[in-house]
């Protein structure tokens, strides 16, 4: 049963990776492996826990010494572990749901039009750097997935030639992932580490900004020698119907941006989980939006109401994370991840090599379960820890470097990150084309950032 859980997890990932050829949505596969891992765990619990790899089981027995046998096993899994992990997963899911809704509200109110209307240059090199830097900093404010969607939509209005647009869209993926790595709200993995307490807001910015900047700049510099001339804009680009005034668009953009940026402040002041700050921001934006647009015509008002916007939020993505994180927590509880941690320590025993290996793996396997696995494999140590264990304290080298490698390593392959998958779906970018033209750039950028971080420490 212990091996069967791992087998289910691996086969589930094959189905997720083969989503397009099999024409089976990855969310369905994620939900199934999330449930099946717990089912197999429960059915073979006594045999699995008897192997001694589960640190959670040892902790449970120390807390409840009066429970024994099958009663203890079933109480541990059904009432203790699932409930505990569901609380951690829910914090992430509600945070994502709140953030995605706020971004969608800004988009529906055409708030991003304030930014996109300012881009006028047609010079390829200038446009490349403008788009790259805008993506880099915007993804830190929003998140890399949302920023990619916005920027790829923008590129459709700026570039007519498909191959040229693929190059720019690919660089959006690279810079969005790099920009999201140094912000506590820029990537799902940094959100997970931030909510989990492994990193803090100011320290992650201070420690990872320069490596992330190198990861973005080096590919841009190299590509600048290959792209020449000017872009050709679409001739018959239809102008979007405007539902709001320029003042309203600026107002909703500022309000939404302030709401997102206030979440780290909320956590620092109240010491409450960040998802509560995100939901507070969403509630305030909801009220203000309803008040400001209540006199609009019914057709426009219905489109702009937050209750209508919620129907456009990418719920399958939220459910995908639910399934993946459920599967990972099952492996964490049963002890597979603990076993993997010991293996990596025995073979590498170097936090830099371990994190770099996780980063490269994230180009093949989604970085969310990898980071969730690392969080389960390597518990945080006390601030007084010394030697090798000092790398695992809050804001320690392992966690900071993990935020960088897991956030940027996925750029090496188009399917290695949520941003890459979004760009691939929107622009129909071919896997082999990306592998031939962009992967080496992403790898050079990734290693450049690793080198910068290593030199800093």
Image (spheres, rainbow, N blue to C red):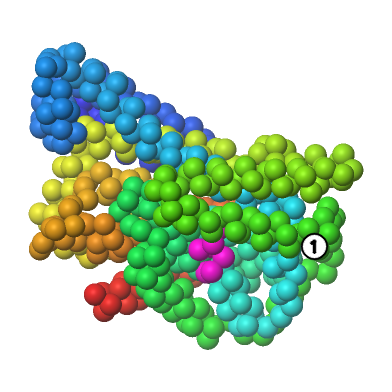
Of helix, strand and loop, which mostly describes the magenta segment?
helix
Could you tell me which residue is drawn at 35 percent across and 52 percent down?
A: 193
**Residue 311, percent across and down?**
67, 37
Nearest the viewer among 52 and 221 is 52
Q: Residue at coordinates 70% horizontally, 77% vertically from top-left?
A: 231
Residue at 24%, 64% (x, y): give it.
397
Nearer to me, 66 or 265: 265
x%, y% of residue 18?
Answer: 45, 43
Which residue is at the far right?
297
Name the quadrant of the C terminus.
bottom left
In the rendered image, the quadrant that contains the N terminus is: top left
Against 443, residue 196 (above or below) is above
> Which secondary structure, mark 1?
helix
Residue at 40 percent of width and 60 percent of height: 201
Q: Is residue 213 magenta?
A: no
Is residue 360 placed above or below 313 in the rendered structure?
below
Q: Position of residue 447 (x, y in %)?
A: 33, 72
Quick check: 451 left or right of 349? right
Identify the magenta region: 136-142
Of the pair 252 and 118, the residue shown nearer to us: 252
Residue with the mark numbered 1:
247
């Amino acid at each position: 049963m212990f091996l069967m859980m791992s087998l289910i997890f691996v086969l589930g990932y094959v189905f997720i990776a083969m989503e397009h050829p099999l024409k089976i949505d990855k969310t369905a596969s994620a939900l199934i492996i999330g449930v099946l891992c717990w089912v197999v765990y429960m059915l073979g619990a006594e045999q699995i826990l008897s192997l001694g790899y589960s640190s959670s089981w040892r902790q449970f027995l120390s807390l409840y010494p009066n429970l024994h046998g099958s009663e203890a096993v079933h109480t541990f899994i059904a009432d203790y572990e699932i409930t505990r992990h569901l609380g951690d997963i829910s914090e992430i899911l509600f945070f994502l749901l709140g953030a995605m809704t706020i971004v969608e509200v800004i988009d529906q109110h055409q708030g991003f039009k304030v930014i996109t209307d300012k881009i006028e240059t047609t010079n390829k090199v200038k446009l490349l750097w403008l788009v790259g830097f805008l993506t880099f900093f915007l993804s830190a404010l929003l998140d890399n997935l949302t920023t990619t969607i916005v920027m790829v939509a923008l590129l459709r209005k700026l570039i007519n030639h498909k191959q040229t647009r693929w190059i720019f869209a690919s660089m959006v993926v690279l810079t969005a992932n790099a920009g999201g790595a140094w912000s506590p709200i820029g990537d799902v993995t940094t959100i997970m580490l931030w909510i989990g307490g492994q990193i803090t807001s100011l320290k992650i910015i201070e420690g990872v900004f320069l490596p992330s900047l190198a990861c973005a700049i080096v590919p841009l510099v190299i590509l600048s020698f290959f792209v020449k001339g000017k872009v050709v804009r679409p001739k018959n680009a239809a102008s979007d119907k405007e539902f709001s005034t320029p003042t309203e668009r600026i107002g909703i953009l500022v309000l939404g941006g302030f709401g997102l940026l206030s979440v780290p402040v909320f956590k620092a002041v109240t010491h409450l989980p960040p998802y509560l700050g995100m939901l507070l921001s969403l509630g305030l934006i909801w009220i203000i939006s309803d008040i400001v647009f209540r006199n609009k015509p019914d057709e426009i008002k219905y489109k702009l109401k937050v209750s209508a916007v919620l129907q456009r939020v990418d719920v399958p993505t939220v459910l995908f994370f639910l399934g993946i994180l459920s599967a990972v927590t099952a492996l964490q509880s049963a002890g597979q991840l603990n076993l993997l941690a010991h293996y990596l320590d025995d073979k590498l025993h170097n936090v830099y090599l371990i994190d770099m290996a996780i980063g490269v793996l994230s180009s093949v396997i989604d970085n969310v379960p990898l980071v969730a696995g690392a969080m389960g494999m390597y518990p945080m140590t006390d601030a007084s820890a010394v030697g090798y264990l000092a790398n695992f304290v809050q804001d320690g080298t392992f966690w900071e470097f993990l935020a960088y490698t897991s956030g940027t390593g996925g750029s090496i392959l188009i399917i290695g990150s949520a941003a890459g998958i979004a760009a691939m779906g929107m622009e129909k970018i071919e896997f082999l084309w990306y592998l031939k033209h962009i992967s080496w750039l992403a790898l050079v950028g990734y290693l450049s950032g690793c080198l910068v971080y290593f030199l800093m420490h």
